[in-house]
Image (tube, coloured by chain):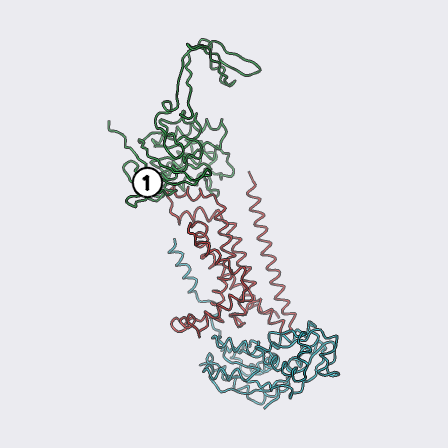
Chain colours: A cyan, B green, C red
Amino acid sequence: MSRAFVHVCFLFMTIPLPFTSHSQKQEVVIAAAADLKFALDSVVAVFTKANPDVDIKVIYGSSGNFFQQIGNGAPFDLYFSADIDYPRQLKEKGLTLSDIHLYGTGQLVLWSSTIDPAIDKMNTLLNPSVKKIAIANPDHAPYGRRAEEALRHYQLYDKIKDKLVMGENIAQTAQYAQSGAADVGIIALSLALSPAMQQTGGKYWLIPADSHQPLEQGFVLLPHSKDNKGASLFMNFFTTSEAKAILKSFGFNQP
Amino acid sequence: MPHPPTSTIRATKLLHTAQGPQRLDIDFQWQQGRLLAIYGPSGAGKTTLLRILAGLTPTDSGFIEVEGETWLDSSRRLNLPTQRRSIGFVFQDFALFPHMTVRRQLEFALPDPNDNSIVAELLSLMELNELQHLRPAFLSGGQQQRVALARAIARRPRLLLLDEPLSALDDDMRDKLQDYILMAHRHYGLTTLLVSHHLPEVFRLADEAILLENGRIRTQGAPADIFAASSLTGTIASIEESDGSFAILIQSLHGISRIAVPKTEAAAWQVGQQVSIKILNLSP
Amino acid sequence: MIDWQPLWLSLRLAGLTTLLLLFISIPLGYWLAYSRRRWKIAIEALVSLPMVLPPTVLGFYLLLAFSPSHGFGRFLDRYLDIRLVFSFPGLVFASLLYSLPFMVNPIIAGFSSLSPNLRAASRTLGKSDGATLVRILLPNIRPSLITGAVLSFAHTIGEFGVVMMIGGSIPGQTRVASVAIYDEVQSIRYSLANQYAIVLLAFSFLILLLVYLANHHFNHAKTLP
């Protein structure tokens, strides 16, 4: 009885799981900072039209989280980080396969669906009708770190710190503001320009770039992409002027 | 004629009863083919004794040899598992398998599934033919008891162990089922150990009785020898009836004894009949 | 257009987990129900731990255990070429731990509710413990087995925290329905999130409805003469 049981269990463990059956397409898995959400989707759409054999899957999240996951062996082929420092650290640990490419500089905006932040600019945050302010978690989201720096630069941080709510990444932060859960959000310009945010009818104001460290963003090929031609194809495509134009249109300043 | 094989049990075990710890210390023998009753007050250790024989309850020390085969010898660290002891056990709650029909219970018990002739025989002997496709939930207490008995016998055991099999039944049912037990015991030439705290049952069924008290054997012998303290002989002088209750008056050397009897038995007696009265000592 | 892949992945994860749990929990539940060893209490507590533990605690330790940069994960990765972190087999393993109490506890309760004499009776009829388990005990705890299976299945479908910690939201591998909803909400694709959510809601309701119907049926059957 018990031997038969062990046997059956073993059988289950060794049955090839259906997801391992590869299609003809070459699969590339990308871990990307959440501010790239709409820009990267557009780049991928253009790329896929030219390279239908490559199946690109993008997972969006916070750059710091991906950094941790890659360190723990996550099977990503490419890593797009909102803070170029993360890929640099990976390279120092020998966890990369290529040089690090700077693909743009991100910009911070104040975004609200109820107030026009262009009127009072940073002082919008002191408006008594503002009860909650969404920022990304500074511990692991680069946009959160820069938002905190900007708040300190304008000497607002201590005054409003009780109103802060933390998004797990910049996309969730934008969603907090979009849904009205937070009255104002400090989010990425690339997200403020996205169709989903614009449809809500919110308004934004660009926070001056000199109020914080630059949001230098970089990407790198990871060891998991070894022998994956699709991954290097996509990397090369990302440095073309066509891709750069798309990024620029989503508010990423180009080097 | 050679002597029938003898079986032996010696066992000690510390019991934790409601009245505190109590030591079970037993040592007795029985002969093949006998029906032995184990009688005693509740808490005396009767059920434990039966379960020790079946290997369902461990002992502190013990020795069991049944018809030449050693089942337990704690001095040699020998302990035959229940499965390998040739026993049929009828539990107090019958322990019928709820998901099996009567027939399937008997078939389950067969030592050799290919030889199921005994199933049909038992079904008719125990008058279970019409119930054979029912599950226990649809049977009365008496019917369940018959199934439990038939199932224990279907295993073709050397030793049949009955743990107060009739205690859950009313008196009428008891009488009928005693007949079934006796019939099965004789028909299959079994050696039977019956736990009971019902004295009439002991008298009716047992060749031999053991009186168990406080975990020890007080005495062993024929029921009449153990329990009969005195007897007197006389003649029925008259039978009285008042308000539907009956009594017979018996004239003996020591005078007249008046004994109340149930209405159903009154008709069995006649004035002038020679009778003997036995007075039993329930705690000899 | 709804992408069925996350839902299908959730179903596959829950189905495989439930199946494996049945095989694991029957012997484990049997041992926990019948063993007389004192320290089995500790095992019982350990099995039930995921019921009270925040999923992130389990996720955190599994992440440490599976990571190819540490001891055990490194051993698996180097010598057996198995990587459990951010992979479907890893999720199955995590779900086994996470849903274990939901399978084992009903099974223990089922065994304990049976008269101990049933097991004894089968033994006196010469049947081995294995045969007794398969032919006598299991058929009589069928409602417990069904309850355990349904609860484990539903609990695995609803798993989120552990998957977030060790899954990595990889489409077709670890992006199960509950995580997909989270992702879609972040992307402000509410209608897509809503579609997943509605399917899960309807599915969960259906499952519980079936459990209660089955319980009702069993209870009803018991009260017959």
Farthest residue in the bottom direction?
A255
Classify residue B255 by image quadrant. top left
Closer to us: B126 or B117: B126
Describe the element under mark 1 as helix, strand or loop: strand
Q: In the rendered view of the protein, which quadrant contains the C terminus of chain A? A: bottom right
**Left or right of residue B83: residue A135:** right
**Rendering coords of residue A129 (x, y %):** 75, 74
Residue drawn at point x = 34 percent, y = 26 percent? B221
Q: Nearer the viewer, residue B167 or C118?
A: B167
C161, C140: nearer the viewer: C161
Q: Is residue B276 left or right of residue C207?
A: left
x then y, percent, for residue C134 = 43, 49
Q: Position of residue A189 (x, y in %)?
A: 65, 82
Q: What percent of the width, then of the height, locates residue A247?
A: 61, 85
Residue drawn at the location 36% of the way across and 26% of the way down: B207
Chain letter of the residue carrying label 1: B
- What residue did someone put label 1 on? B62
Is B88 situated left or right of C147 in this image? left
Q: Is residue A25 visible?
A: no
Residue sitting farthest toward the front: B20
**Quadrant in the rendering for residue B210:** top left
Q: In the rendered image of this protein, does residue A99 appear above or below residue C5?
A: below
The total number of labels drawn is: 1
The reply to whether residue B24 is visible in this rendering is: yes
Q: Quadrant of residue B149?
A: top left
**How busy is the neighbourhood of tag 1: few (under 14 within 10 Å), some, or many (20 plus)?**
many
Q: Is residue B65 above or below residue A152?
A: above
Pick the residue in front: C131 or A168: A168
- In the current view of this chain or complex, which residue is farthest to the left? B1
Residue B11 lies, with reference to residue C38, above or below; the image says above
Q: Give the amino acid type for the residue marked by disc 1 in the picture.
A: Gly
